[in-house]
Amino acid sequence: MQDPKERDRWWNEHMEKTELTRKRWLAAIDQPMKPFGFWNSDSTNAKYRTNLDPGVNSLPGRAKTLDD
């Protein structure tokens, strides 16, 4: 059988390491991945604007949208 003091020491060390890992992880994901306004740029909205154009949207081979 394990020594209770040794088991408690191991558990406390494990919890301290886990808490440090959690704090580092939360600090890393707290930062925004994309700058403000990234999704409003021309390159990210090009497909959206193309799909809004009825001349392009109704070309042969294009999938029909729910609005059609």
Image (cartoon, grey):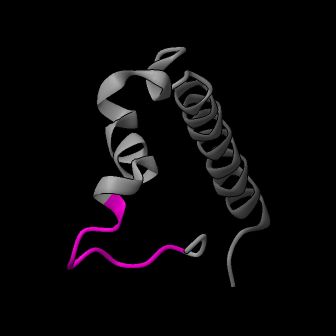
Q: Quadrant of the C terminus?
A: bottom right
Q: Quadrant of the N terminus?
A: bottom right
Q: State the residue lying farthest toward the front.
A: 55
Q: State the residue lying farthest toward the bottom.
A: 1
Who is closer to the viewer here, 17 or 67? 67
Q: Position of residue 19 (x, y in %)?
A: 68, 39
Task: Please state the extent of the stretch shown in magenta in the rendering.
Answer: 57-65
Name the residue at 34% across, 68% down.
Answer: 58
Who is closer to the viewer here, 31 or 16? 31
Name the residue at 35% across, 78% down.
Answer: 63
Who is closer to the viewer here, 51 or 28? 51
Q: State the residue lying farthest toward the left.
A: 61
Q: State the residue lying farthest toward the top.
A: 36
Answer left or right for 6 relative to 58: right
- Seen in the picture, residue 64 relative to 19 is either above or below; the reply is below
Q: Position of residue 48 (x, y in %)?
A: 43, 45
- Seen in the picture, residue 17 relative to 55 is either above or below; the reply is above
**Total numbered circles:** 0
Residue 34 visible within the image: no
Name the residue at 70% across, 56% down.
Answer: 11
Answer left or right for 10 relative to 47: right
Magenta region includes residue 23: no
Name the residue at 32% across, 54% down.
Answer: 55
Q: Position of residue 62 (x, y in %)?
A: 28, 74
The quarter of the picture where residue 29 lies is: top right
Answer left or right for 46 relative to 35: left
The majority secondary structure of the magenta stretch comes to: loop
Residue 3 visible within the image: yes
The quarter of the picture where residue 7 lies is: bottom right
